[in-house]
Image: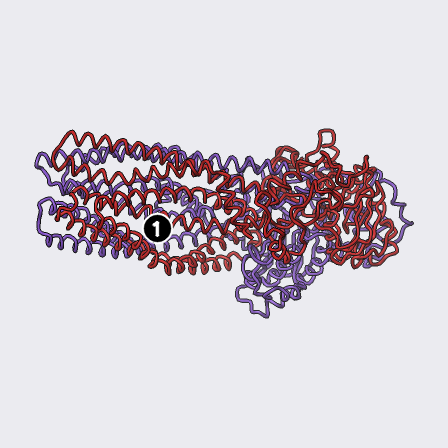
Chain colours: A purple, B red
Amino acid sequence: MTREPLDSGSPERELLPTATPARTRAAVLELLRPHRGLAVGGFAVMVGATAIGLLTQPLLGHIVDLVASRSAVDSLTVPVVLLVIVAVVQGGATGLGLSLIARLGETALARLRERFVGRALRLPLEQVEKAGSGDLTARVTADVSQVAEAMRTALPELARSVLVIVLTMVALAVVDWRFLLAALLAVPIQAYTARWYVRNAVPLYARQRVAGGAQQQQLLESIGGAATVRAFRMEDEHVTRVTERSRRAVDLTMRGVWLVLRFYSRLHVAEYLGLAAVLVAGFLMVRGGLTSIGTATAAALYFHGLFGPVNTALVLIDDAQSAAASLARLVGVIDQPEPAPRTAEVTASPEEAVAVAGLAHAYEPGRPVLHGIDLSIGQGERVALVGASGAGKTTLARLIAGVHVPAEGSVRLGAGERVAMITQDVHVFAGSLADDLRLARPDATDEDVRDALSRVDALTWAETLPEGLDTIVGEGGHRLTATQVQQVALARLILTGAPIAVLDEATAEAGSAGARVLEKAIDQAIEGRTALIVAHRLSQAVTTDRVVVMDDGRIVQTGHHTDLHTADGPYATLWKTWTGHRPTDSPTACDTDPAEAHGPADPLLLPRSAGSPEPSDPSAVSESPDRRDN
Amino acid sequence: MGGGRDVLWRTVRGQRRDVLVGSLLGACHQAGEVAVPVLIGVVIDEAVGPGDLTALLTWLAVLAAVYVALSMSFRYGARAGERAAEQAGHELRLQIVRRVLDPRGGAEHGRLPGALATIATEDAKRVGAVNMAAMMGIGALAGVLVGAVVLLRISLPLGLLVLLGTPLLLFAGHLLSKPLERRSEAEQERAAHASGVAADLVSGLRVLKGIGAEVPAVDRYRRTSRESLAATLRAARAEAWQYGMVLALTGGFIAIVALIGGRLALQGDITLGQLVSAVGLALFLLGPLEVFSWVNAELAQGRASATRIADVLNAPTAIVAGTGSDGLFEADTPPHPDPRSVRADRSSHPNGGPPEADAAPGPHGDGRSAMAGVGSDRAHLGSFPRPVRGELRLRSVRCDGLALDLHVSPGEVLGVVATDPAYATVLVRCLGRHVDPEAGVIELDGVPFTDVDPAELRTRILVAEHDADLFEGTLRGNVAASEPMLDRVLVAAGVDEVARGLPLGVDTPLIERGRSLSGGQRQRVALARALAADRQVLVLHDPTTAVDTVTEARIADGLREIRQGRTTIVVTTSPALLAVTDRVVLLNDGRVADAAPHAELVRRNTVYRAAVLS
């Protein structure tokens, strides 16, 4: 129920498309078409079952007539036996009809959700991100379950009620058209009440959902952040926030309750008027000799029997409406065109794994984040991409990985090359650890899986999990640490067998100590692969073949760490700041680095002056939208 | 013992007025519903049969009056019941939140935030709904009693037939559906699994795309969906046949009532109208009787939910609040760092269970007073000399393998480097009083932590954890700095740059707990908030792991400057941050291995160099 509060942040959200009502109807018919026989059969059986059930009232009326005419006691046998037969047949037919309809509905529903998920997972990431991560999640959870719920409970009940209402009307007409006329007196009130209800209920329930979502969000926030709340002494503030959200949800619920209760009051008026009219009609017709007491009784019973179905049908109208809205959102995604496959253009030389030429990109028009990038990465080469935040590293990495389509220029891969990318966005898929890893290669043997884990130093802990590799991890399962999660991601990368690996700050979330474990794991994971590593920990850059320094969407320096960190230039500045901005630290900083020594360090006991090395260009470190992607 | 029952009882008692009103009106409504079929019979008998217009008009007027009464009593009764349910749920929700946020902690132990949030919403709602169920149950009982009286007055044998037959009928239906129900429940669960898998795959969409695993993921989902379809179909079929069976049984029962009633009428024992009433009542009584089984189910669910809520409310605290106090601020529940000992202790409570009023320590008792009482009269507790100097001393502290003696001078900027990150976490947790050390004392300005109310302590010392959460609100609201302080804090933490990249600058709302920002941006905002709190002692744990090098260096300088004269401890392995500290303590294997300025350690200590620079 987190659908609503998500779009409050960015005014420029482009939600995923919603289908038109006509298209939604067509999509539903398309889903049902293969099951035409089932649909017709199910409906016919339900009509039959309802019709048979409606024989009960005339049979009871007949018994009343028999009593009124003082017939023999034995004469009751026939109508009573008929009543029993009606009951049994009606029960059997209803059971059959309902199970046929459930089969129809559930099968169609399963196909709908499979097509939706199939389509949703292949949407371009850019489109999903523009819509906000919540949009797709809300559709796959709230909308799918709304449709399912309607299909399972609301629709059969609505169909049954409507059938009973329609057939009862027919039966009343068959008994005597004048009874039908009397009964119809209730209809204008009911119709008006239903319209009034839907008009008020739909917006109210939408607000209720928003309030419910906001309450849930607040609870998750206050409870999930309890440690922070306590540390900052924000307990009172958060209790107040929860109180407000909860109060609001309760108030709206009470308004909904009051609306429903007023709705029922109006229906009571309709009930009374209809019942009185049928009784008056019966009175007049019996007095005029137009009908028997038994028939009048049957008519009154018919009408009394309508109370339930009418109320049900009217209450379910808005369920059906919101299910239709959800369905439109699902069909909207299903109807999205297939994304164009990655261009098949390959690099000129087989030695070249990636060739980037004249690449430029902007997430929003007028705010370019990359300008004229040319970069060639050789087979098996390891390249580190460094620079301040907002320099365009992530964007370049994503363009090379094929996540985005470049606005200008081209990215070509070597023949038969594939790219796998790991970012700081991590996810452990719910299920067993082995299943999670097999997403990368479904036919991986146990040996392959263990091998991949062991290459990233994860086999040891994986085997000590409660049930080893079969331990359920992810949502609701065993919790892995940030470092372990990233190790799993690296093991997946190994299993994909993709010759090119792109790693975008894959160590960022693990904390400083975890980062070191991960750096080793990364080293082992990318062995034998072409690798592009976006790094903010420069120790990762030291071991690569080539360092590419980016600033403000351009490549400003390339070369090997050994050459760059001593040469004057942006990399040397980065390196100094990374090692604690004492030029004197670097000699001993890194054993792999036989650089010259300077004098001893300044005493570090004094407060620092502001004169330490700063990036020369302030715009170099400004944030650009590519850093806001999660 | 009886924690759940206690919660339930307080829930009903807390709303007793609404529950009482609801029950009375509910009973009126049910009586009215009984009267309708009876009146139909009377109209047939008195008006339609003899053709008496006056009688017709009279009885129609009576019917109208009955309708007004039943409609109004339903309207106001149901409102009272729902209000009682919602209000009780609301109050329970707040009790749970207060308990979770209690400065002494402990409620989150062994529970995921999502699970706690579910307890605060779903379980609170379920327990609240017991009020509505109680009201409905009482109403239905009234309906059955009125129906019974009417039926028995019409005819003893017919009345007995209906009164004994309807429960029997329901019981038979129940019996028939029992095995089906159990199966369908299990299968519904399997069905729900499919939607969980889909949501999970969508939230891992970036990861899937990164490794090109969309197709295997779709295949996996299709398999789950198919399995779930098969399960759902079995459940749906079972339900359909169960419904058909109940329908057949009800019809058969009506036939029997008609047979016996018809015979009685033919024998002249009852009138024609009474026959009609009896058939109508037989149909009607199924309603309130079904309510009973619904109430039963609601109560069972309510009990289970109440137990879960009681477990949270009675959860032992993680730390003691001021043991040096004389009872002004006594802990209602003793602390139990070991969750296994919880149950044993609760059952061995001196009175066999705490008295009702303070059975749930979190809510109105300590939870609230702990928050409200800060800053008021704390004379009974250990308190700090004013002004606070910010001198921190750890004396022989033992905690989870950590063994530490440490002195931090007032105003010192101290770096702490742990070769094993687990010890860094333990130290941070001790300083933030998530736990108290197993042995030894931590003192702030000479006052032991355990002598002080944790809430009071946290006004002096702030421990900003690595994974601190941001909250909903604008960036400015999250940082929560006073106006003159704001700019300095933003610059020091590098948030000025973050704000420049956002559409509305510092007034941009942060959504999804700051998930709209990148990891590095979130960290900087969290750091700015920690600096803005301006506590005498600030402990930062890995504050810049996701921040780029250039910014990190800037932050290090800003931090040094803005914390001028106030004690600051930075637990990190970042060389840029360590370079601005006065002194660094190296923890190896949970013990102090060395202590010196950063540059010196880099020069002479290889362990340190490995920990910080490799």
Amino acid type of the residue tagged 1 in the rendering: Glu
Res A418 visible? yes
Task: Indicate the secondary structure of the residue bearing disc 1.
Answer: helix
Say which residue label 1 marks. Answer: A30
| Residue A470: x %, y % from top left | 56, 65
Report x, y in % for residue A408: 59, 44
In the picture provided, is A23 more to the left or to the right than A581? left
Say few, some or many: other residues with alpha carbon within 10 Å of mark 1 (under 14 / 14 to 19 / 20 or more). Answer: few
Give x and y (percent) for residue B244: 28, 55
Residue B351: percent from left, percent from top? 61, 51
Q: Tell me where residue B461 sits by quadrant.
A: top right
Point 30% across, 35% down: residue: A267
Quadrant position of the C terminus of chain A in the picture: top right
* Up/down of A219 relative to A44, above or below: above
Can you see residue A407? no
Task: Find residue B274 and report its image quarter.
Answer: top left
Q: Chain of mark 1?
A: A
Q: How many marks?
A: 1
The residue shown at (81%, 57%) is: B591
Q: Quadrant of residue A82?
A: bottom left
